[in-house]
Image (cartoon, coloured by chain):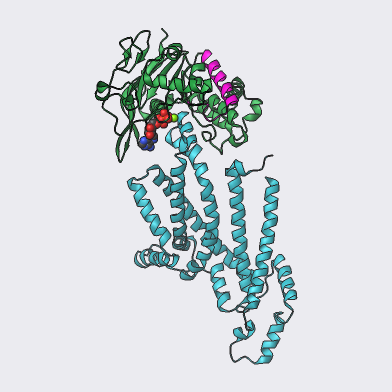
Amino acid sequence: MKQNIIKRLLQAVFVLLGVALLIFIMLRIVPGNPIATMMGEHADPATIERMTAEFGLDQPAIVQFARYLSGAVRGDFGTSYSLGRPVAALMRQAFGNTLKLAFLAALFAWILGITCGIIAAVKKNGLLDRLFMGLSLLGVSMPVFMVAMLLQYVFAFHLHWLPISGVDGLKSFILPAIALGWNSAGSVSRLVRSTLIEILQEDYIDTARAKGNRQMGVLLRHALRNAMLPVVTMMAIQISSLLSGAVITETIFSINGIGQLAVQAINGRDIPLLQGTALFSTAIVIIGNLLADCLYSVLDPRIRKEA
Amino acid sequence: MEKNMLEIRHLSASFFTQKGEVKAVNDVCIEVPKGKIVGIVGESGCGKSMTVRACMGLLKYPGRVVGGEAWLDGKEILSLPEKEKCAIRGDEIAMVFQDPMTSLNPVVRVGKQVTEALRLHRNMPAAEARREAVAMFEAVGIPEAKKRLSSYPHQLSGGLRQRVMIAMAMICHPKVLIADEPTTALDVTVEAQILRLMKKLCSDGTSVLIISHNLGVIAQLCDYVYVMYAGRIVEQADTFTLFEEPLHPYTRGLLSSVSSLRRGGDKLDTIPGVVPNLLHLPAGCSFSLRCERCEEKCRECLPDLMDVGDGHKVRCHFAGRGEKA
Ligand SMILES: Nc1ncnc2c1ncn2[C@@H]1O[C@H](COP(=O)(O)OP(=O)(O)O)[C@@H](O)[C@H]1O
Ligand SMILES: [Mg+2]
């Protein structure tokens, strides 16, 4: 078990390295000098040359990559071309907002999705099942931006219950989190429902009932843990879709987060900022998968190595 | 005569499907006397599992009991509210299922699964429950009982798993143990061990109702046998009588298909024809479609389960006259 985790950690480091290299290469393949783009059409060639040297862009690619890596390890991602501030500082500021947003969205999506999925499975074909499955179909089929604008319109613009955009305390994260989690809630609830219905047909559920377990005991002690296995896998995948959704959500709700930084970086061909945000997102996805793997092996003894 | 620990009276149960009512169990009466092993034998699909599941209150949707009673040690249990049924299940009446590979929860340690009934019904503290489980594991012949408690099902062989299932069912010392084809999924040597174990349990005073489609298992184990066909009991007798003097043509067919195997003949005696569709049972004897002796009245009128003496009962128009059908 412990060995397994160490192995996975090492793997994670290599994946991260690979991704760093990939991002690096992709950004250099794009034609044109980013400094020239940044300074606009009328910048004089001497200044461009001086700036290019200042950012180290005149060095061979290998040297640039080595510098970038050694910086990244120390938490230094260089200075943003477009904002003129250290990328690390920019990200630190944005990190909290994105984490709050993604965490709340995941919490919303998974608690709601799992609860509704369980109720729908237990009350299969009942009124609640139909209601929840109808809603979840809406959930999986509505794009993030649409949900976001709908929520903004109803709860902020019309009802004035919550702020329409910007960051002002935790309450300004409620609508964005719901908008971002809506999709995932839909797919999780559908998966929980179908898995649980299948599990409830298993022979060991009969055994559990034959022992004298009531319905609640059967669910909690026997069915749920088995039903959660595929759900955990799905949750790990959703972490990355939550992150990409965060880009859209942060833009719509004007939340100063990693997603917004990434958009800024792409628009401004801001290589250091882009590298930083991309690496950050990759790290989150890798950590999420690692956690899911650990959770999975806690839940399912069959995949644990014999001690 | 010993008192009956389990008495199934005129039990009927059906599946209500879109095509109609599938009458899987039809007016079945079974008695399990205290400390005896009673068997139900019949081809697959004749309603054996359904009969015992109905008693346990474990029918699968869309199956439902449509009539009859089940008395457990003088108490009617089918009409109890669900809460009280849960209190009895696993405590006074327990069940071992057919396939030990799928009947244990794969993600829970077997020790926890075995002690669960004790915690549910006896409110026993964990340490004490573990001691009970170790004792029970030893009683059912699981080696290294203590260590095995912390195993997961996938770490055990089929035979061990079935022993775990039996230990699990026996942990509260139920009055009646129901075993639904407990050895069908196991290989022959393991089967013999499990059967010996069941016999031992019975000598400790538990009454056992065992289901099998294997006459050999029944012959070795049971004191009394019920033969089931298309949802009905067609013959019942003590084991010796049934094997020596079978009266129903179906029972004879079953026995001769086994003995033709044993003789090693190159031709296997089988019962010709097909089992009737439980959706549209014939008006008369269910076996009439396959019976060599079938006459007009067999097709038209369902024979009663007639007592031909000494508790030997047969559902056949030709059995009562003392002639051998
Ligand atoms: N879900 C179902 N819907 C309709 N009929 C069913 C269903 N499940 C079982 N049956 C029918 O019930 C009958 C009895 O099944 P069962 O008691 O399991 O037989 P046995 O245990 O004797 O092999 C079978 O003939 C089968 O066709
Ligand atoms: Mg069966």
- Would residue B23 appear left or right of A171 to someone viewing this image? left
Relative image position of residue B179 (x, y in whole percent): 48, 24
Quadrant hosting residue B55: top left
Tell which of B251 and A255 is nearer to you. Answer: B251
Residue A291, given in percent of the width and then of the height, sits at 60, 52
Magenta segment boundaries in residue numbering: B180-204
Tell me which corner region of the image, top left, top right, bottom left or bottom right, holds residue A289. Answer: bottom right
Q: Chain letter for green?
A: B
In the picture, the quarter occupied by the N terminus of chain A is: top right
In this view, which residue lies farthest toward the front?
B266
Q: Is residue B105 above or below residue A72?
A: above
Identify the residue shown where x is 53% and y is 13%.
B203
In depth, the one of B53 and A141 nearer the eye is B53
- Count how many numbered circles sit on residues in the image: 0
Residue B29 placement (x, y as % from top left): 35, 19
Judged left or right of residue A252, residue A25 is right
Q: Which chain is cyan?
A: A
Above or below, comparing residue A291 to residue B292 in the picture:
below
Q: Give the residue drawn at x 34%, y 66%.
A: A158
